[in-house]
Amino acid sequence: KAGVTQTPRYLIKTRGQQVTLSCSPISGHRSVSWYQQTPGQGLQFLFEYFSETQRNKGNFPGRFSGRQFSNSRSEMNVSTLELGDSALYLCASSLGASVVTDTQYFGPGTRLTVL
Amino acid sequence: GNSVTQMEGPVTLSEEAFLTINCTYTATGYPSLFWYVQYPGEGLQLLLKATKADDKGSNKGFEATYRKETTSFHLEKGSVQVSDSAVYFCALINQAGTALIFGKGTTLSVSS
């Protein structure tokens, strides 16, 4: 069974630009979560989608947005990039909607560098 | 809100040494606790979990016991291998039950 895939794996952008990252969950998984990983802040929750609906959102500015499609694939978008947005963005998928009972499977991440 | 603190790294060990990575938590109630591992260039993988107090999670020789008295979930392995070199993250579920909260991660380096 294929794992969680994220594209692209690496991105270089300049300040002020916008970027879209893509995540394809494991087949059959309906929940997709996004996390930002930085050396200073560690892993922080961005948002979570289930059946095309954003159910939960972390403490990030409105420049960070996302969506989920009917095939459960998800995209996240960051507008007006800032240097501090440089990070590894991780996507995780799970079969159901419960963080307690449904194991989250992580992709390899997209490394975003903002210059 | 819920939070987790784990020991700073890096931890450097020789092969076959005993490993302990400390993790303590602050939480309302007794949320599920997790250990994730991140190998170089890869995403996080669930290593083990415990869903209630006194539970012991175990996998691949690693163990951790959910101790409510000391609010701890320390990761242990009796004999580490070079292939265990990775970053280890302790995590728990946030108060709303909607997302994972991770510790800062502990880098383990095992030499032969």
Image: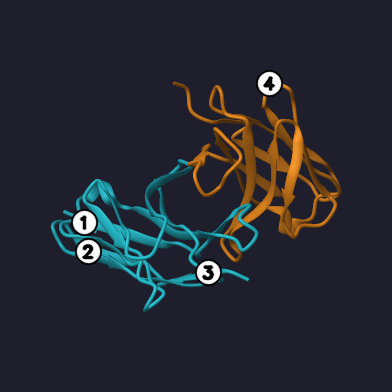
Chain colours: A orange, B cyan
Q: Nearer the viewer, residue B49 or A77?
A: B49
Question: Which residue does the numbered mark 3 point to in the structure image?
Answer: B29
Residue occupying the far left of the picture: B16
- How far apart marks 2 and 3 lie (CA) works out to 35 Å
Q: Taking B9 as reference, is A109 above or below it? A: above
In primary-sequence order, the first of circles 2 and 3 is: 2
Side of A2 where B67 appears, left or right = left
Packing grade of label 3 (10 A; few <14, some 14-19, many >=20) is few
Question: Which residue does the numbered mark 1 point to in the structure image?
Answer: B111
Question: Which residue does the numbered mark 2 point to in the structure image?
Answer: B13
At x 32%, y 65%, the residue is B54
Q: Amino acid at mark 1?
A: Ser
Looking at the rendered structure, the secondary structure element under dot 4 is: loop
Letter of the chain that mark 1 sits on in the rendering: B
Q: Amino acid at mark 4?
A: Asn
Question: Which residue does the numbered mark 4 point to in the structure image?
Answer: A71
- How far apart marks 1 and 2 lie (CA) works out to 6 Å
